């Protein structure tokens, strides 16, 4: 979101912020679902093998994680690509620096 603020494109910044809010909520909600399913147990050492008893929670956690890393053809990929493209096409040197830092 920092590089999105650095480029002068308000719609891209808001698009990424909205997408980030939704795909950040998936793993957080899934963590709450795991805590609820474990009867309020929060000790990670007592959790394990929860993919088979909680398949929908596992799927949502996996999907949210894929969105966050910008996996191709998911919304995280397109919102991060929408930031990198205007940053790269800027004529000034700061645009290329912003794009390189974002890709790293």
Image: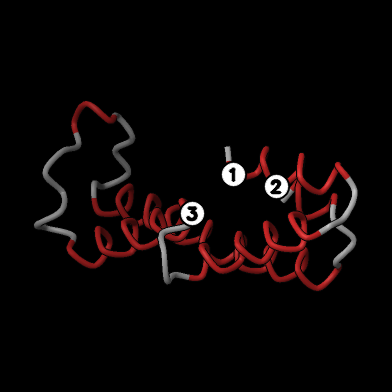
The type of colouring in the image is secondary structure
Pointers 1 and 2 in contact (CB under 8 A)? yes
Q: What residue is drawn where x is 16% and y is 49%?
A: 50
Q: Which mark is residue 68?
A: 3
Q: CA distance from mark 1 to mark 2?
A: 6 Å
Residue 87 is situated, as x and y percent measured from the top left of the image, at 77, 55
Q: Mark 3 falls on what kind of element? A: helix
* Viewport quadrant of the C terminus: top right
Q: What residue is drawn where x is 86% and y is 68%?
A: 10
Mark in front: 3 vs 1: 1
Q: What residue is drawn where x is 74% and y is 55%?
A: 88
Residue position for label 2? 99
51 or 74: nearer the eye?
74
**Left or right for 32, reference 89:** left
81 or 12: nearer the eye?
81
Pointers 3 and 1 in contact (CB under 8 A)? no
How busy is the neighbourhood of tag 3: few (under 14 within 10 Å), some, or many (20 plus)? many
Residue position for label 1? 103
Residue 99 is situated, as x and y percent measured from the top left of the image, at 70, 47
């Amino acid at each position: 979101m920092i590089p999105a603020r650095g480029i002068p494109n308000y719609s891209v910044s808001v698009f990424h912020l909205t997408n980030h809010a939704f795909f950040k909520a998936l793993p957080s909600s899934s963590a709450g679902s795991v805590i609820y399913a474990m009867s309020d147990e929060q000790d990670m050492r007592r959790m394990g093998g929860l993919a088979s008893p909680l398949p929908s929670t596992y799927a949502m956690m996996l999907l949210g994680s894929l969105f966050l890393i910008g996996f191709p053809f998911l919304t995280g990929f397109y919102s991060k690509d929408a930031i990198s493209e205007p940053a790269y096409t800027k004529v000034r040197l700061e645009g290329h620096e912003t794009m390189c830092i974002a890709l790293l």
